[in-house]
Amino acid sequence: MNQNAVAQIAVTITLKALPGKETALAQLLTGAAEIVQQTEPKTLYWFATKVNQNTFTINDGFADESGMQEHFQGKVAAVLKNEAEQLLVGGWEKGVVANIQRSSILSTIQKK
């Protein structure tokens, strides 16, 4: 990831696991950070959270549109799309795409 770029675009996606699929979704998200690190130099930050038993979030930051588009066409997005029907309430369209929230970052700090 490019440590000199400044994130201007934030994306948060809220995901709800199907009953009994919470652990599988958590495992997918846990392994995803390394894939993003290795394959998406324009993704400035990426992290996943567990909100409660069945609700998770993916959080991304990008300097520009090109980074965001590359991310949505990347390996993690492909795996999530492939697994969505088995893991998520609403599958890909209603469980992922419909829950994408894009924001403009107003301020940030970067500690080294």
Image (tube, rainbow, N blue to C red):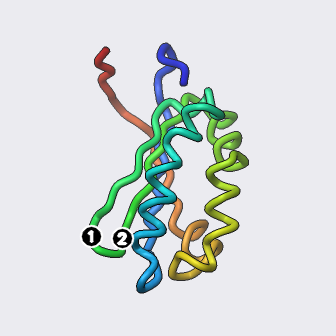
Residue 12 in percent (x, y) is at 45, 54
Image point (60%, 66%), residue name: 97
Q: Secondary structure at mark 1?
A: loop
Image point (46%, 35%), residue name: 45
Q: Residues within 10 Å of mark 2 (few under 14, many from 20)?
A: some
Image point (33%, 28%), residue name: 108
Which residue is more in the foreground, 27 or 101? Answer: 27
Residue 3 against residue 107 in the figure, above or below: above
Query: How far is disc 2 from disc 1 in space, using C-alphas?
Result: 5 Å
Q: Quadrant of residue 109?
A: top left
Q: Is residue 70 left or right of residue 109?
A: right
Q: Secondary structure at mark 2?
A: strand
Residue 83 in percent (x, y) is at 63, 69
Residue 55 against residue 63 in the figure, above or below: below
**Mark 2: amino acid:** Thr
Name the quadrant of the N terminus.
Answer: top right
**Mark 1: amino acid:** Asn
Q: Quadrant of residue 62?
A: top right
Report the disc number at residue 55: 2
Q: Residues within 10 Å of mark 1 (few under 14, many from 20)?
A: few
Q: Is residue 25 left or right of residue 72?
A: left
Residue closest to the far bottom: 19
Residue 52 in percent (x, y) is at 27, 70
Name the quadrant of the C terminus.
Answer: top left
Residue on which the image places disc 1: 52
Image point (40%, 73%), residue name: 22
Report if the CB atoms under discs 2 and 1 are less than 8 Å apart.
Answer: yes
Residue 9 in percent (x, y) is at 50, 38
Report the disc number at residue 98: none
